[in-house]
Image (cartoon, rainbow, N blue to C red):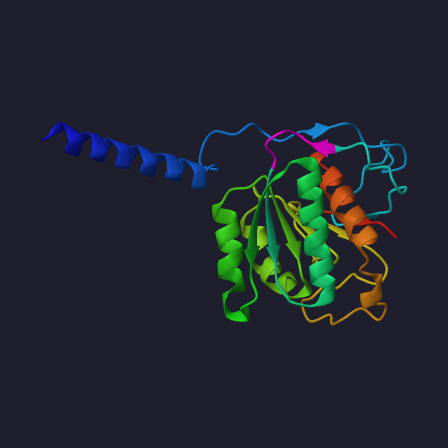
Amino acid sequence: MRPRLAATIVLALTVALTGCGANDDWAGPRVAPSPVGALGNGFVDPKAPPTPEATVTPKPGSWDGVHPSKGYRVVLLSAGGDAQTKTLTDAVTSWAKAEKVDLKTITADDPAHRIDRITDALGLRPDLIVAAGNSLIDPLALVTANHLDQQFLVVGAELAEPTHNVTAADWTGAAYRGEGLGMSSTYDPASFTPERAGAAIRAGVASVLHGLTGIVVWIG
């Protein structure tokens, strides 16, 4: 093989391998996630931890001191082009940027393939899957119980009967539950403000990081 041709092949292989590594940065070893900082007074009663499927109402701001550890990997799974879902996804994206979270996004707008998109999210093996959009609730109810080793956080809605790996961050005006229960009589699109959505993602993640999962974190 001529030297110039050999050098060209080596260079091409080097570029290809480097590109693969950059595009598949979640394939390598990872450090188990942990909370940086502690929950403030009033998040939950430490003497009476919440039971499965319980609803807790933390004191506002009691989650502000909690941050994810370096390298926290999150998949944002969203469905729907409505303003409420857009507010939620914007809040998650802003939170991830502020916290330097490693974020990937998956959109599941096609009703026929929502379970496929959830499966795609599972295949990335993130530390947390954050779901935004009411139309994801029923598909999540079908999938999450079969993947108990994967943590999920639903923002702005909740599963009717969550398993211990599904946490929700909800408030008055949201609380869509799916499974034929219909829209809550208190549902109010105007309640989906950037401030409330931002509080929901921060409170929900703080709860998950401290092992308070399978519950509803009610932010008011």
In the displayed structure, does residue 42 sit left or right of residue 120?
right
82 falls in the magenta region? no
On the image, the x and y values in percent for residue 112 come to 51, 70
Towards the viewer: 76 or 186: 76
Q: Which residues are magenta?
A: 67-72
Towards the viewer: 106 or 171: 106
In the displayed structure, does residue 96 sit left or right of residue 116?
right
Q: How many numbered callouts? A: 0
On the image, the x and y values in percent for residue 93 come to 67, 48
Image point (49%, 54%), residue name: 119
Q: Residue extending furthest left?
A: 1
Instruction: Identify whether 20 is placed above or below 106.
Output: above
Q: Is residue 71 visible?
A: yes
Quadrant of the drawing holding the N terminus = top left
Image point (51%, 58%), residue name: 117
In the displayed structure, does residue 189 sit left or right of residue 23?
right
Image point (71%, 39%), residue name: 98
- What kind of secondary structure does the magenta stretch mostly adopt? loop
Image point (57%, 51%), residue name: 105
Instruction: Identify whether 89 is placed above or below 45.
Output: below
Q: Is residue 216 visible?
A: no
On the image, the x and y values in percent for residue 141 come to 62, 59
On the image, the x and y values in percent for residue 21 come to 41, 36
Q: Residue extending furthest front?
A: 4
Towards the viewer: 158 or 133: 133
Instruction: Identify whether 212 is placed above or below 87.
Output: above
Kindly indicate the quadrant of the structure image that contains residue 8. Answer: top left
In the displayed structure, does residue 10 sit left or right of residue 136?
left
